[in-house]
Amino acid sequence: MSELNKEISDYTKNLNKASKDENINRAVTRAVKSFRTNVASTLARFPHTVALAAEVREIKASAVKNNKELLEKAMASIERNHGSAYFAKDGDEAIKIVDQIIGKDKVVIKGKSMLGEEIQLRHRLEELGNEVWETDLGEFILQLKNDRPMHILSPAVHVPREQIAEIFSNFFQKEVPPDIPAEVAAVREFLRDKYFKADVGISGSNVVAADTGQIVIIENEGNVRLVTGTPPVHIVIVGIEKVVPSFQDAMKVAEVNWRYAQYDAPSYVNVISGPSKTGDIEKVITYGAHGPKEFHVIFLDNGRSEMINNLDYNQALFCLRCGGCMYECPVFQVTAGHYGRTYLSGIGSIWTAFVDGGPDVAAPMLYTCLRCGRCVEQCPMKIDVPKMVGELRSKVVED
Ligand code: SF4
């Protein structure tokens, strides 16, 4: 059996198995129902969001076109703000930069980041001898379960509360009931100590403003506040496609992002411009007051430049990672994210083809997509996934 045939056969078995898994079925059914209801009601309460989304599409299209120049501007702004900016051409380079910043045997706390999954950040930092903790509740569950995210926004969407209770009871060595508030409280208690012991906090970013060098991170749990504000060193790893021209643009992107991710207003919108500082003593600016003394931003390419330069596919870079398309996808609804790759569903097949192994690796996902177009209707960026899937299929066949 050729490598590709074997991969397709394993992939099909995996999807079939997932489609018969009662835990997945129960958890995804609950999630789809509540996500759809929540998005519909938030868009009804804030109807201007639809027009704002169209404006954001234009912002993203222009930003992707001018990415090189915006990236240079963003990096210069970060340096001006007393941060350090880096460019990494691939995952290995990004890990090397992180390794050089943090050194060995450190306690590292992480916020949720799909890009972190893309480059296997936690595993690779652990291999380098660090103690690494996921602080997003969903990612923490997956860390204990030794599993991978099954949704870009809600990574543990496939794990129902009953199974989480079992995992937590085992890990915490005490009875944790299948009661969501009790499960949340158990993790809060455990991670509290890690926040204050950590040497380094690592986060992603939803969007970066080139003019001010500010990074914007949307969250609800409050873990990102602690990850980015408590340890002495904060490292951001972000894809080059996340840069937009101005802070105003960045806030528009953020607002559309959280609305389509089902929130009227998220609990927190973190805007970070540089290391913590004070001028309270004799007006002398001193870095490292209560927050991090060091602020590092690593921009990762890892195939994104190729996507930018390919006009047939560069609309995939407009993706805000709101996750809405997945809840509309008929395949996702029965299998969750059991595609075996970091990026999931139709849009994920395009990303996989560019940043996670190439078109052959993406082939099984490309042929799983039904090209029904329900994702395009839901997508705030109106990304034409079925069209790109069709084109990539032809490319896979030709090659
Ligand atoms: S493709 Fe569209 S709907 Fe899907 S995650 Fe990206 S922005 Fe959201």
Image: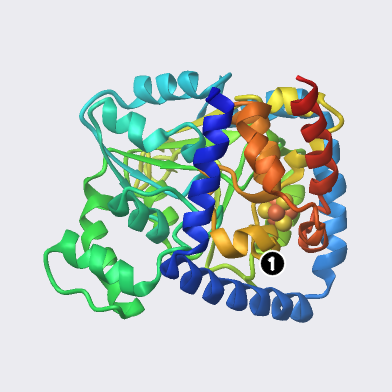
The part of the image, by quadrant, that contains residue 105 is: top left
Q: Residue 98, how many percent across, how many down?
A: 40, 26
Residue 337 visible to the viewer: yes
Left or right, residue 350 beside residue 121: right
Task: Say which residue label 1 marks.
Answer: 259
322 to 311, vertically: above or below: below
Left or right, residue 68 beside residue 108: right
Q: Residue 150, how many percent across, how many down?
A: 50, 54
167 to 101, vertically: above or below: below
Looking at the picture, tell me which residue is in the foreground, 120 or 337. 337
**Residue extending furthest toward the front:** 1
Residue 313 visible to the viewer: no
In percent of the image, x 88 and y 64: which residue is there? 51
Q: Residue 86, how many percent across, how many down?
A: 54, 22
In percent of the image, x 50 and y 70: which residue is there? 25
Looking at the picture, tell me which residue is in the foreground, 218 or 382. 382
In percent of the image, x 60 and y 30: which residue is there? 361
214 to 223, vertically: above or below: above
Q: Residue 140, how many percent across, how many down?
A: 34, 55
Rendered-image quadrant of the C terminus: top right
Task: Identify the coloring.
Answer: rainbow
**Beta carbon at label 1 within 8 Å of ligand 1:** no
135 to 126, vertically: above or below: below
Left or right, residue 162 beside residue 90: left
**Residue extending furthest toward the left:** 173
Q: Amino acid at mark 1?
A: Arg
In percent of the image, x 70 and y 77: which residue is there? 42
Q: Residues within 10 Å of mark 1 (few under 14, many from 20)?
A: many
Q: Secondary structure at mark 1?
A: helix
Looking at the picture, tell me which residue is in the foreground, 77 or 323. 323
The part of the image, by quadrant, that contains residue 301 is: top right
